[in-house]
Amino acid sequence: MTTPAPPRMYGSEKLVSLTDITQSRDPHRIYHQLRLEHGPVAPVELEPGVPGWLVMGVEQLRIITEREALFSRDARNWRDLNDGIVSPDSGLLPMMAYRPNVIGADQQEHRRLRQPLDDGVGRINHRALRRQVQRICSELISTFAQLGRADLVADYAAYVPMLAIASLFGLDTRQGHELRAALIALFSSQTDSQVGNRSFEQILFDTLRERQQHPSEDLTTALMNHPNLQDDPEVLQSMVVMISAGNETTTCWIAHTLYRMITDTSFDDRLRSGQLGVDDALDEVLWREPPMTHMPARYALRDIELGGQSIRHGDVLILGLSAANSDPALAPEGTRPHNNRAHMAYSAGPHMCPAQDTSRVITRTAVDTALHQLPGLRLTVTPSEITWNPSPWTRCPTQLPVAFAVPHDIRTTPAAARPDGESA
């Protein structure tokens, strides 16, 4: 049996862990220090013994996302994986291993697989979606409103995109809850990540089989009938991409905006007084806390110099979307006008997020509904007690325990049943 090569570290220094960055109280302080020490491309650790490059400069990020002949999305080019440095049981693999879908494809193959996603997103009626999300939000709030307290992550932010996106694909509420649990495990890149991934795909496979027997007017049926998708695995993987990316990132965006409202008095005052529109507020959050903190990945197709670093053929590069937003070359601190969407929250190049408008509709509606239906929101713990879900990729609050004033019109109204059938 071949003995795996020893881990190749970038220099002799101890590498900063991506998960340590996302778990930090202030990731931008760490990005600043990394820039001082290494420049716009810094060596980091993806998991113990697995190194990578974190691309923090806007110029460098645009290079690796736009030059597909030099930097591939196909993880079969990842040297450390091929050399056995990355374990087959690694929690990184559900997010980073090759999948035969649009995320792992380059150039013409990517264009072929991207078109069904663009067409699917184009089918979404945003007015109808907004009404549906408003109903979901009001129903969720009704389950805890008379209590005067809630966890705005577990009781609200985690439910809204899950239920909205699941319904677009024809999944019922129970399946939506199962998807959410599987996705939490998948995005954590921890020991249960691969189990979560298998559960996630099985739910979608069962839905696909059902739609083959009973077609409907949902996105599952639309993907199933798209001429660019050649077989069931390609349809399934297109569903995987749209649901996993849309759900987790939108949950993070809602949670971070609510967290900012509760902990930043100036931000909340401007929002509630109308000085700051909801869309402007959402973009302020995207600058500081983009839903995808670190986006995997690109793989160098040859030796190349990037940002002062010698990148070797097969090295893995992580898109530091949050770090890029604090790159002075993009917008020096204090110079960003309202409604500035020049941030890198959606990445760049051909793989840029195709559902920006859809995620904004869901997030805006969720935040606006909470703003109007939950007066006097305040944390019941100190901001320093807020923790973050363990993940090298996203930075979502584990919980947001809050109290608020009980509206007069519901103080004597019985709590509605939770969406999963449990009483509040």
Image (tube, rainbow, N blue to C red):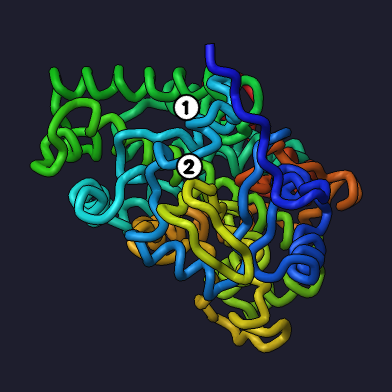
> Which quadrant would the C terminus be assigned to in this image?
top right
Identify the amino acid type marked 1. Answer: Leu
Residue 394 in sight here: yes
Q: Are marks 1 and 2 in contact (CB under 8 Å)?
A: yes
Q: Where residue 219 sits in the image (x, y, percent)?
A: 24, 39
The dot on residue 179 is 1
**Up/down of 365 relative to 193, above or below:** below
Camera-nearest residue between 357 and 266:
357
Element type where label 2 sits in the image: helix
Residue assigned mark 2: 247
Label 1 or label 2, whichever comes before in sequence order: 1
Mark 2 burial class by Cα count in 10 Å: few <14, some 14-19, many 20+: many
Q: Count the labels in the image.
A: 2
**Residue 313 point in image, percent of width and height:** 48, 50
Residue 258, percent from left and from top = 68, 55
- The location of residue 38, given as percent across then percent down, is 73, 66
Please indicate whether residue 168 sits to the left or right of residue 330 in the image: left
Q: Residue 181: tell me if it is visible.
A: no
Residue for point 23% across, 33% down = 234
Rendering quarter of residue 104: top left
Q: Residue at x 57, y 35 (%)?
A: 187
Q: Which residue occupies the foreground of this view, 261 or 93?
A: 93
Residue at image location 65% in from the left, 60% down from the top: 289
Classify 163 as above or below 67: above
Quadrant position of residue 143: top right
Q: In screen coordinates, is 7 left or right of 94?
A: right
In the rendered structure, the answer to whether residue 410 lies left or right of residue 316 reads right
What kind of residue is marked 2?
Answer: Asn
Residue at image position (57%, 25%) is 193
